[in-house]
Image (cartoon, rainbow, N blue to C red):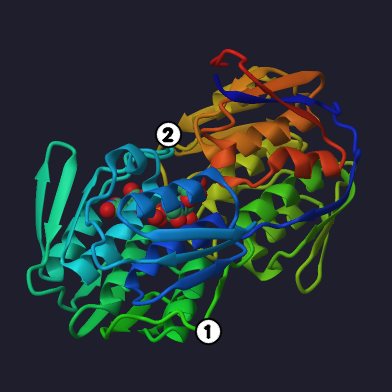
Amino acid sequence: MSNALVIKGFGGERKLSGTVRTTGAKNAALKAIAATVLFRDTVTLTNIPEINDVERMFELLKDMGAEVAHSKRGAYTVTIPKGFATELSTGIAKKMRASVVLTGPVLSRFGKVSFPHPGGCVIGSRPLDLFVDGFEKMGATVTVKDDSYVVEAKGGLKGAEFFLKNQSVTVTETFMMAGVLAKGTTVIKNAAMEPEIEELAKFLNTCGAKIAGAGTPTITIKGGSLLSGKGHPYKTMPDRIDAGSFLILGALAARELHITHCEPLHLESPIAALRSAGVAIETKKNEIIVRAPAHLKPVDIKTHEYPGFPTDLQAPMTVFLTQSDGESTVFETIFEGRLNYTESLAAMGAQITMMDPHRVLVRGKSELRGRKLTSPDLRAGLAFVIAAVIAKGESVIHNVDTTIDRGYEDVDARLRAIGVEVERVSAIPEVIA
Ligand code: EPU
């Protein structure tokens, strides 16, 4: 049994209008939840998106002994007790790559952590070598057996300096948090610069941490003692991928769509790409207004670490390019397995040629037809929703619970509110398109 979304497509008409409110950011909230392990007292978290990944992260913490209270929608408190366990539940961690960020705070506070190789979206090999290198540089011993890791730092972690060969967001956040309770200074070079990292650092600094340079390629953390959440509630920043996904949908199918409670400055690259394709976009302080033009021009897209074009918007943007008149290329530079969904778009009528595992050529404009679809990952899932909305006829998107619901809050209700004909059904057998 799984949930599916049934969407009646508009067949290319521009019918959407209204307002969509951006939710709190998944990839910020998950790290703030992990960071509660660095606190000696209760932490209050607000504007937390009510999505499956967040639920799992809280389950993981509760399984280790944390006291988690959910007072109202989006609001939680977390307290880490003395007898907190240091083993991450395999069942939960295997479903979510982001679980790995817990290892930094747990190891630096309790001197030990064990965890499985984490699961999550199938978008590439997703190694852990940078985590292992970093733990060892900070004085820990790492034992790898079968698929699990045991990391021990008898006497605590020591500050260290390291250069990341890849600008991984979770590696940067893990070691930024590990450094908070380490002895001495930790320096992360070639750090990722995503806004979620800067927000995490700001919050930790408000609560007593000494982190400098977050948002730049060099982050310096002066180790200290446990943090205090008293009087410092955390408020999750707007989700730039949620806002960007609705922006792309609006650019294809809206008479006029207002995306509110977002941060347009975090979407400069996608906004520039859409504008060069001919889309009318207006930005205000926390709002983006978009109108779909009659004709779209082709654009070449290359994903890049922030502030470049986000890999998490690559699949929705490829759907957009199927509607541009002419040839566009999409170059995915971060993950080697993140273009597999294009086969399903081709089955809907898109003209897409795989040039190599990292690049596709998109020829537009193609008329898309509704299909039964099964998404390989959560971001491709939302791309399928966009494709279904602009297609002719009905589409059924399967496995919503294990893809789209992991990262997008109330997606069907929010789509319906702006005019999409969408229905959630259960018990439809899974079909691989
Ligand atoms: N990498 C290594 N060694 C490691 C870890 C990573 O070489 O030990 C490499 C990977 O091979 C890849 C790059 O570093 O080339 C990044 O991979 P990683 O799995 O570490 O991804 P991340 O940067 O931590 C975060 C988001 C992703 C988002 C990327 C890029 C979280 C939980 N995940 O991943 O989000 O795509 O940044 O912005 O924050 C999603 O939300 O759907 C998602 C996949």
Give the residue at x 50% y 60%. Answer: 69
Q: Residue at x 74, y 51 (%)?
A: 247
Query: In the image, is residue 391 above or below residue 65?
Result: above
Quarter of the rendering containing residue 361 = top right
Nearer the camera: disc 1 or disc 2: 1
> Which residue is at 47% across, 83% downward?
230
Tag 2's secondary structure? loop
Q: Is residue 401 above or below residue 218?
A: above
Three-letter amino acid code at disc 2? Pro
Mark 2 = which residue? 357
Residue kind at label 1, given as amino acid type: Gly
Instruction: Name the image quarter holding the C terminus.
Output: top right
State the SS at label 1. Answer: loop
Q: Does residue 33 appear to the left or right of 251 in the view shown?
A: left
Q: Is residue 166 above or below residue 414?
A: below
1 and 2 marks in contact (CB < 8 Å) = no
Left or right, residue 240 beside residue 364: left
Q: Position of residue 429 (x, y in %)?
A: 57, 12
| Residue bearing the label numbered 1 | 231
Position in image of residue 225 (x %, y %): 27, 84
Q: Left or right of 268: which side holds 228? A: left
- Near-viewer residue (4 or 165): 4
Q: Position of residue 360 (x, y in %)?
A: 54, 34
